[in-house]
Image: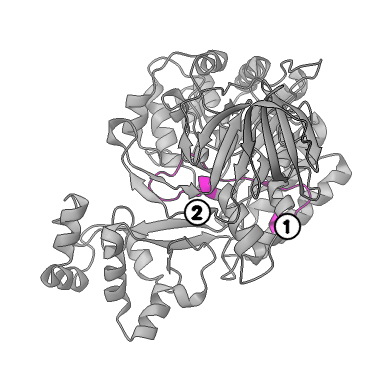
Amino acid sequence: MHDLVIRGGLVVDGTGGEPFTGDVAIDGDRIAGVYPGGNPELEGREIIDASGLLVTPGFVDCHTHYDGQVTWDPILEPSAHHGVTTVMMGNCGVGFAPVRPGTEEWLIQLMEGVEDIPGAALSEGIEWEWETFPEYMDALERKPLALDVGCQVPHGAVRAYVMGERGARNEPATPDDIARMREIVADALRAGAFGFSTSRTIAHMAIDGEPVPGTFAAEEELFGIGRAISEVGHGLYELAPAGVIGEDLAAPAKEVDWMRRLSAEIGCPVTFALVQVDAAPELWREIMELSADAAADGAQLHPQVAPRCNGILIGLQTNHAFSSRPSFGEVADLPLEELVGELSRPERKAAILSEQSSFDNQFAEYMGTQLHRIYVLGDPPDYEPGPERSVAAIAKAQGRDTEDLLYDLLLEDGGRALLLFPFLNYSDGNADAVREMFLHPSGVSGLSDGGAHCGTICDASMPTWLLTFWARDRRRGEKLPLEYVVRKQSRDTARLFGLTDRGTIEPAMKADLNIIDHERLTLHPPRLVADLPAGGRRFDQRATGYVATLVNGVVTRRNGTDTGARPGKLLRAGKPLRAGKLLRAGA
C-alpha cells in the first residue's frame, strides 16, 4: 500500500528519453517505483487517474528574485502557477544578506533599481531577522513554504557589508577587502548557499543611478572571492556579464575569457546570461562557441537561455507612449474603469494625440518611434508575433494613423489589453535564434526573473510557454521535442546546482511532480494585480491545464489552485540528503 499512486499517465521522466505510459508510486517524499506499461496490482491510499495526461518532474527555476517575497509569501506566485517546485534565488549580485543594521533600506533600493520590485512592498513586507547570510538562511528555514527554495550569496550585499560606501560606489577593493569578502562567502557556502552571484552589466543600477556594487570589480576581486568555492568544496558562480544586452559589443568575449579561466582554476561551474541583441544579432553564436570550446580547458560554462523573447509589456496601467502627455496626466490617477471612460471621450483622445511630452520621458518617446516593433500580445499571448501583428502593420492595413490605433488598442479589454515590445531575442523577428541557443549542449533554461520586474514583464510563465509553444503550437518554424523541453527545465537545471535528488521521475528521487492536461494547457495573458505589501503592483500570469503539482510527495496545487499544503523546504547545499548522498552545488 503506497501513499499515492499516479496511474496511467504519459510519463515524460526528465531524462530526455522517450515518453511512456505507466504508473508512478510514491511513499512519503520519494518516488517508490516507476512502472512502464502500468502495474494493476499497485494500491495507494490516494490514486490519481492520469489517463490522457502528462506526468512530468517538477520544474526547477534556476533564475528568480524571490529573495524578499519569500519572507512573506509561502506560495511564490507567479512561478507556482507553472509547475515550478524548486526556485533558486540570489541571482545577479542582489539580495538582502548580509546586511549591516541601518542599511536595510539601501539594499531595498538596490533591488528596486535592478529588479523593478516596488521598494514600498519590500519595506513593508520584509521583517529583518538577520545580519549575516547564515542568519538569513535560518530565518527562511522557519518560514512555511509551498515549494523548495535555494539561495546564492550576492556580491552587491557582500561588497557593501565589507566596504561600506566605498563598496557601494564601486571603488577598487583592497587585498584586505577581498580576503574579508571571501571569508563571508565561504561562511555562506558552509551554511548551505548554492553559490555566489554578481552583475557586471551597466544596465543594472540602484535607484540612485549607481551601478550594482561589483560591476567594475577587477579580476583579483572576482577570482579572490571565487576561491571560496574551491575552499569549501561546493558552489557555482552566476553572473549577468558585461555587454549582455548589447551595451558593449566587445565585452562578452572578454567576459568568457575570464570566466573560463576562473572555472578551470577553482573547478566550479560558471553560469551566465546569454541573449540575442539587436546591435549584433550574431554575437550570441560566437559566445556559444567560445563557451563550448572552454570545456577543452577544463572549464564548465553554462549559458542561461530564455526560451522566448525578452520584452516590455505595454499597457494603460503600466508603460505606454502617452504617459507623459499633459492631457493624459490630468486623469492618470483615476481608477481604471473611470480612466477608460475618460480616455474614451473623443475630446480627451484628440487632446492627447495632439500633444508632445510635458516632461522628460525618453522611454515613452522611444516607444512612440517603435510602433513597427510593438505587437498585439493577444489571448492566448503570442511571444513570436509575425510582422502583420505590429501596430504599424495593422494601422497600414486599416488605413489608420498609427498613434490613433495605438490609443484604441490600449483601451481594449477594459484597459487591460497588453502589447509586446520585444527588445532581446527577437532581432530576426522570430524565435529561431532562441531555438538554436536552447539546443546548446551545456546551456540551461533560465532568466525567468520570477518575482522581479513587476511592472514590465512576467516571464515566470516560461515553463508553460515551453510546453505549449515549443512542444505543441509553433507554426513559424521548427518545434522542440516534448521530452527535450521537460529535461531542460527539470534535470538540467537541477544538476547545474548539484540537486541530484530531483528533476527526473525515477525510484528514490524526490516526489516533485506535475500532472498536466497537455492538450488543454493554455497560457493566459498577464494581468496587473495589486497584491504586494503596501498595495504594490505586479504582473501575474496564470495557466489552465495543470491538474496537480506535488512537492515532496504532497499535492500543493489542484487545477491551478493552491491547496494550502506547505511541504516546501529551504535547501542547503553541502548537507546530507539520504543514503550518504550529499547535495553538492555544481557536482
Q: Earlier in the sequence, mark 1 or mark 2?
A: 1
Residue interval drawn in magenta: 437-461
Secondary structure found at label 1 = loop
Q: Out of 462 and 45, give the one closest to the viewer.
A: 45
Where is residue 325 shown, x and y percent of the image? 21, 62
Contact between marks 1 and 2 (CB within 8 A): the answer is: no
Neighbor class of circle 1 (other Cα within 10 Å; few <14, some 14-19, many 20+) is some
Q: Is residue 216 visible?
A: no
On the rendered image, what quadrant is the C terminus found in? top right
Residue 507 seen in the current view: yes
Q: For the stretch drawn in magenta, what is the main secondary structure?
A: loop
The structure residue drawn at horizontal position 53% and vertical position 13%, both measured from the top left corner, is 135
Is the residue 444 above or below the residue 181 in the image?
below
Q: CA distance from mark 1 to mark 2?
A: 19 Å
Q: Position of residue 295 (x, y in %)?
A: 84, 44
Colouring: one colour
Position in image of residue 506 (x %, y %): 78, 33
- Residue position for label 1: 481
Q: Which residue is nearer to you in this view: 91 or 396? A: 396
Instruction: Give the camera-side residue of 482 and 427.
Output: 482
290 sits left or right of 465 in the view: right
State the mark number for residue 523: 2
